Image: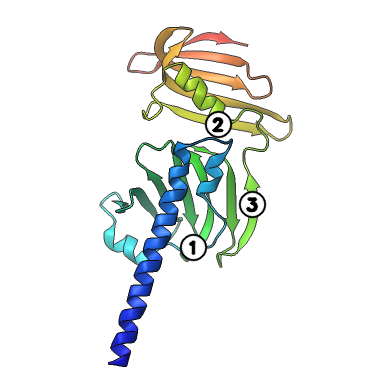
Amino acid sequence: MKKVLFIYLAFVIHSCKSQNEDQKEIEKIKQHYKMDNKHQYNNLVQGESETFNIKRFDESKNEAEDYNYELPNGLIIREFGDQESGYYSETKIKNSLFTIAKVFHTNSHIKSKGPMFKDDCEIGIWYDFDESGKLIKELDLDKPFKIAIEDIIEYLKNNEAELFSSFTSINRSYEQETKKAKWSLIYRGKYKDNLGMYMIEIDDSTAEIIKVVKILGKEGEKEILFEK
């Protein structure tokens, strides 16, 4: 009887702990709505160790070898990967511009994690771990850039870009040798009050637009409108 009671109590404690952790996670992710301070998305990810549930993934993945599910607290999670390349997860909440990306070693321990704009631009602070899940490096990917992601989002809003559209993407690059950085935007919206699909390049140091390309037609034909 005592053994049964112990097992029951252990289950209850574990369930409460899981619920509390889920609630903490959703509260962290909801912070992106406020965006009162610069780089608030860094609060979404912490440097603690964690593991990937390989058994659950293998039992639940679909034909495309993805496992997509939504938790009661509103978190939307996509898991994918394999025993050769490692495992990955993307976590977000509905109507969020930010995704928490995680990469796991083949032994299930966390390898790296950090925030992304949607699912195509790594931003903020990223954490790297060894094969045992021990934190070995913390890297601020925003450090080389003068322009903040919030400024780019504001630019897109001002030009009526559809932020949640699959047509909208943000990428940035930094050359260590030249110390030069730039932003590359693709969106459907306005450029100088003209509607269309555009590719815009912005110099990070001057915040000047250095190239504008208009994408024409379904075949993706391009017209260079401006290049500096």
Element marked by disc 1 = loop
Residue 178 falls left or right of residue 27 = right
In front: 205, or 19?
19
Identify residue for label 1.
Answer: 50
Element marked by disc 3 = strand
In front: 143, or 46?
46
Marks 3 and 2, Cα distance to the nearest angstrom?
19 Å
* Residue 145 position in % (x across, y down): 65, 32
Instruction: Report crowding for label 2: few under 14, some 14 to 19, many 20 or more residues within 10 A (C-alpha).
Output: many
Question: At x 46% / y 23%, what residue is drawn?
Answer: 186
* 51 relative to 76, above or below: below
* 18 relative to 120, above or below: below
Amino acid residing under circle 3:
Glu
* Residue 61 position in % (x across, y down): 29, 56
Amino acid residing under circle 1:
Glu
Marks 3 and 1, Cα distance to the nearest angstrom?
16 Å
Which label sits on residue 149?
A: 2
Identify residue for label 3.
Answer: 138
Which label sits on residue 190?
A: none
